[in-house]
Image (cartoon, coloured by chain):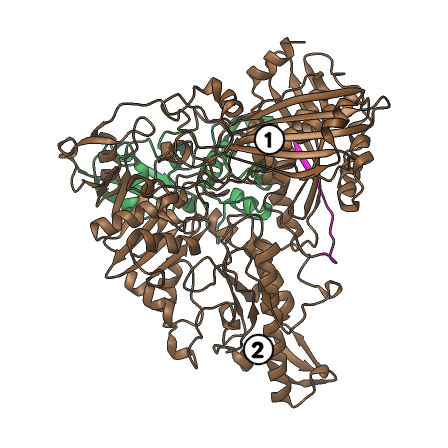
Amino acid sequence: MDQKISFVVDGKSATVNADPAMPLLYALHAELGLNNPKFGCGKAQCGACTVHLDGAPVRSCVLPVGAAAGKRVTTLSGLGTPEKPHPLQQAYIAEQVPQCGYCLSGWIMTAAAFLKNNPKPTDADIRQAMTGIKCRCGTHMAIMRAIKRAAQMAA
Amino acid sequence: MNPITRRDFLQASGSLVVSVAIPGAVATALSQGISSSAVLGGKPPLLPDQLDSWIAVLPDGSVTAFFGKMDMGQGVDVAIAQMVAEEMDVAFDKVSVVMGDTATSCNQGGASGSTGIQLGGVTLRNAAAEARRILVERAAKKLEMPIDRLVVENGVVGVLDYPLMRVSYGELIGGKHFHHRVEWNKRYGNALALKVQAKPKDPSQHKVVGKSFPQKIVAEKVYGRAEYITEVKVEGMLHGRVIRPPNAGCTPVSVDEGSIKGIPGARVVREKDYIAIVANREWDAVRAAENLKVTWTAPTAPFPSMEKLYQHIRETKANGKGMPVNKGDVEAALKGAARVVQAEYEWPLQSHASMGPACAIADVKDGEAQLWTGSQKSHFGRAGCARMAGLPPEKVRATWVMGPGSYGRNDAGDAAHDATLLSKLTGRPVRVQYMRHEGTGWDPKGPAAVFRGRAGLDASGRVVAYDFHGKGFTRQEMATNESDPKDTLAGQLIGYTAKPTIIFQTPAELYEFENKRHGWETIPPMLDRASPLRVSHLRDPLGPETHFASESFIDEVAHAAGADPVAFRLRYLKNERHATVVKVVAESARWQARPNPGRGKGDVMTGRGISYTERNGTVVAVVAEVEVDRRSGRVWAKKFWVAHDCGQIINPGGLRLTIEGNVVQAVSRTLFEEVRFTENTVASIDWASYPILELADAPESIESVLIDRPEMAPQGAGEPSTRTVPGAIANAIFDATGVRVRRVPITPERMKAALARI
């Protein structure tokens, strides 16, 4: 049965009328019209749907929208803006990372949470922390450079 | 994005001097009131022989280029803007490139065969040069000065020694059309070429071409503001999901519509063997597709068991063959050889597995249709949509919108036909987005193949005979351009029949052996209708497959001759460009002669291998350094050196990133990727059952040497380095371990088993 479910997305309150079992992704993308996160697999296998729920990365393609009730959801566009960019976004632009760019929410949202807790990671730390995030275009070299650059910028 | 109506969109296309590709941008353009009132004289028909079909100058002097191809993320549009800016003498940031919309561009073949710059860009270069010539001519009249006294800088025509005499492009033509005819070769698609009076600049004059410019779209993507095909919303649209059978080739016996009764607004749409769900809300369509009960015909085991795939290829009677290289008398030379080296190689079916499954939106209504597609072929897709909708092509507009990754004929071409069929059947705009099992399981596959090399050496180790033969699925079990429903799943399910095109690949190398043969054979599809294992173009069609084998084999021959792999290749490469990439990559990697492989000691063995290939005028050599862990069997393709010669370089920064992407994707395909299947259906349906490279597996470094040849025409770079990588990895493994791995993917299990055999 549909219910009214309210949460905060990128600083603005939002309400959807939906089955609480519906994945959060469909609320964000289809119902609220946000351009990201993206549908990649619906199985929490790729990361393209990653958002922060109260600051922690979650896969919105499997998280029931009911679980977001009353919480803060942050998407890639809420992480930073051209006026107030997140270091990872600046680093991604400087390194020109994207090919298709459909995977970006996975990498940037996961890396943002990771760098917050690990401000001075080694290469091996970064490789390990990003396990399970997919990029099909093969931009991994640029991704490594961007995450390291962002860590340096934040230091 | 605000929903827009199809009618707004169709009307917009006819009236703008500069129309735009993305619906959101169209809505913006409309709201700003740009309309036909700003256009004097009306736009000539959108035909290749009109300069206005290629170039427009806006009142502010900025330039729009209309490109009948599109960018899949490598940044070809940046290169096009550079080429146009260069020829017109305007600043790079004054040029915008509108891509892949049938309402604004001519059919240049879409994203295809790494020809974006090589063919598509050269056409725009010619158009831009012609536009400049005409503008300078007009300026000469206006300023009453001879042409040879005029100079152009930043879109302003000035007069030598008279700094106050000047007129800008905007003043000369801004917002108006050229109404100028150019010659064209009457061939649509990749081959479309223009002949103009103007002569493009001498490369020595280039200021914009040859420099690195970033992609503006990167920032939009990174801030989550870019609009993908998945974000297109049309007023009143339904969400569609397609039902696939549990076993390949099965057809529906009955559909239990009651099984989705509880899901609001969801209903079944069926035509012949085609079944789909539509619903007003996306989640309802997804749920209904999951819950719908369908009774299917019994499985028929259309495939061999996976273990017998290569046996199937070897034993199946060929339906096509060729021998494009046949020099001397190979058989006689083999008989007379002191020693014969022989080896066979195998490459599996692989999936595009694009980052997101495909999406398309179609609105078929009132004798017209609008298609939004993320595919590489919007112009041909227009014809396909027209056929599927039963409309004349001129009543259809197809608009490319950036999709979730594309490396050839992936599932996007199928989604476009699904959306069209569903819109036709429901009378509503329909958005179809596939699920992951379709993106991986039901996309067209890269072909599996087996290869055999035979070489004869004389007593001194000289190659006296060389024979290379490939056999596998044609790379086009259905045509790749999406212009006909027969080449799509939806079309085949409603009764169209695909006809395979027989086309294969032989090694693209120039080793000069006196007796040399390259041959190929193809076999028919395993299942000829709506097959999840149907084969089509995947980045560098048959390139990685063939050159994994041919560059492994030449390494085996070098080893048999007791020669260093670099020196051995150079012994037989007489072509200057081909020999140069080999020499350059060896120098870059500080290659040390290594005639004796298997020197790796300890648990982790390190080795290096080389490979070199050509592709349509681009020559690439790669050195790979790998680490092989004896205990786990894990291969880490750790370091790469690339020497890349694609003629004139337009954007070195973009090229470097393009090469990196190709190398990493090729590492993934060489070490991890294989489509699994049973006798009844595809078993690789998600990222767990079709693993690809993770960040932990990415190389530590890729060093590219870009060989610029400004005097040459630009060649392609989107794919060529892909085919060079697999052989370099296999050869490095041999160098590290002394073991030849002749089957891809080189998984830890296979590597371990191979090590155990020595």
Please state the horizontal and vertical placement of residue B326, each as a whole percent of the image: 69, 37
Residue at image location 51% in from the left, 20% down from the top: B311
Q: Is residue A118 visible?
A: yes
In front of the other: A123 or B409: B409
Magenta segment boundaries in residue numbering: B699-712
Callouts 2 and 1 in the same chain: yes
What's the amino acid at mark 2? Answer: Tyr
Describe the element under mark 1 as helix, strand or loop: strand
Return the chain for callout 2: B
In this rendering, the answer to whether B475 lies above or below B66 is above
In this rendering, the answer to whether A91 lies above or below B313 is below
Q: Quadrant of residue B204?
A: bottom right
Numbered mark located on residue B169 in the image: 2
- The brown-tinted chain is B
In this rendering, the answer to whether B351 lies above or below B378 is above
Label 1 crowd bin: few (<14), some (14–19), many (20+), radius 10 Å: many
In front of the other: B173 or B517: B517
Which residue is identified by label 1?
B470
Residue at image location 61% in from the left, 74% down from the top: B132
What's the amino acid at mark 1? Answer: Gly
Describe the element under mark 2 as helix, strand or loop: helix
- The green-tinted chain is A
Q: CA distance from mark 2 to mark 1?
A: 56 Å
Q: Quadrant of the N terminus of chain B?
A: bottom left
Q: Is residue B234 visible?
A: no
Q: Is residue B700 magenta?
A: yes
